[in-house]
Image (cartoon, grey):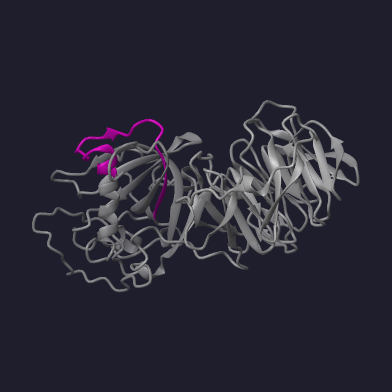
Amino acid sequence: MAKTAILAPGAMAVRPQGAIQGANWSQIPGSASSAAAAADGSLWVLSTAPSGPDKYIWHYAGGNWTNISGMASEIAVAPNGTLYAINSGGGAYSYSGGAWTVLGGGSSAITTAADGSFYVLSNGNGAGSDQAIWHNVGGTWAQVPGAGVAIAGSFDTGSYTLSGGTVAPGGLYVVNAQGTIYYENTNASFVQLPANASALAPTAVGGVFALGYPANAGGSNLYYFDLNAQTWSMQSGAGGSISSNDGTLYAIGSNGAIYSTPVQSAAPTPTPPSGEATAFPTPNSTPNLTESCDTSSQRCGVQRWHTKTLDDVNENLVNWTPQLMTVTQLNNVPVPTGFNDNGPGGSDNGRYAPYEDQVYTVQALLVTRKHETGSSGDDDYHVEIRDPNNPAATMVTEAPHGLCTDACASGFGPDFDSIRSLLDTCFGAATSGFQAFPAGVIVNMTGVGFFDGLHGQTGALGNPTTGAASNFELHPILHIDFVSGKPVGVPGC
């Protein structure tokens, strides 16, 4: 470990408050590039200086920062407070009692385990490639199955049964180069978690926090996976690095600002998309087929129109907590038995449970857009999206016109119109022909699940009448957040 001069506490001056964290977050004075939460409630960080991959190491305890000699590219803390670090040369070290101990070389990532041992990823492959996993117990190294680009040890003493297997105590979370998340048990069995991530912060209370995939230099969105419910929910805030202990989650913003928030003993309540907070608690439970708004000059849809606009009789069954999925996963949602594109039993007011009773969030590439006008159009905005990690996987998403009958009556009309307005402001007014979005526009899109009949829609996959991959949509869209490719210098975008 390279020796460096001890820095004054003033070097950890507070960074400007960022816009990425919500009201539940508290800012900690100082700046960092990554963090490692300790079991005793203190925090170890790598600073934003100097330039290059190896950074100064700081410890935050009792409201004060202390710098120690040495620099590192990644750090982790064991339950007994021992600090582990690796540098850009691959060297692994431990720090305890004011002294560094050399542990070995050839490492690219490091994490600690509940039993005090630690894991590293090797650096034998190229940067960004999956690396072999090695486990050090009592000074003895052994390779374990699997490979990845990021690892995080579990300190949870609970056991959780997922659809793909059991998450038992003492294991290791692994993220591979495609963002796929696995949990490796101590018996070398693996359990895959749904969705993708760029970084993980396991808790000790039945869940794991994750940053969205692919990583966003401006701050990746934050999600929480509840191991009991087997569901993802989007959280307030974003960051480039996260770490947690028994009671606190830490996030590092894109400008180096450091934030903390309490970790709850159950999945935190997600922040609903903007504008929906008042609509969610009081959804219509009984649609009125004669409801109308001022639609004298407004053309609207017919087929399953109540369901498409959230004014159907089963709207009260919708789970408004977004489930994090991928476009590829939604492409493979099974077609309901006896599917009828007029609805269950031919009813405009029915929903196919459980998939149409759920709000989903997907990270997707915007492909094309069309304003469905004309004698056969329902005035929706038809938006085609694609899985950024699987170009073959596309799907249809739709935003109704907020003044259409039932769209207006549902109470969600302003939400629908805000989606349409955002797209028009950022990319110009929609036309009756398909317009391609600029290359590389990736968003987190939230909407309600919906099965549609296949009638030549651009972006639709599968055929519900034959049982092939489902023609599953997000209809209606409720919220859009830009991840990358947002137009620069466009007022209101």
Q: Is residue 154 above or below residue 493?
A: below
**Residue in view at x 62 percent, y 64 percent:** 228
The quadrant in which the N terminus is found is top right
- Across and down, in percent, residue 281 comes to 38, 71
Magenta stretch: includes residue 314: no
Q: Is residue 187 above or below residue 384?
A: below
Magenta-drawn segment: 423-447
Occupied quadrant, residue 436 = top left
The quadrant in which the C terminus is found is top left
- Drawn side of residue 354 relative to residue 168, left or right: left
Front residue of 199 and 72 = 72
Front residue of 301 and 104 = 104
**Residue in view at x 30 percent, y 41 percent:** 457
- Across and down, in percent, residue 61 comes to 71, 58
- Across and down, in percent, residue 179 comes to 59, 40
Q: Is residue 383 above or below residue 123?
A: below
Occupied quadrant, residue 283 = bottom left
Magenta stretch: includes residue 431: yes
Residue 417 visible in the current orientation: yes
Occupied quadrant, residue 407 = bottom left
- Drawn side of residue 396 relative to residue 70, left or right: left
**Residue in view at x 52 percent, y 43 percent:** 255
Front residue of 476 and 458 = 476
- Across and down, in percent, residue 391 comes to 46, 33
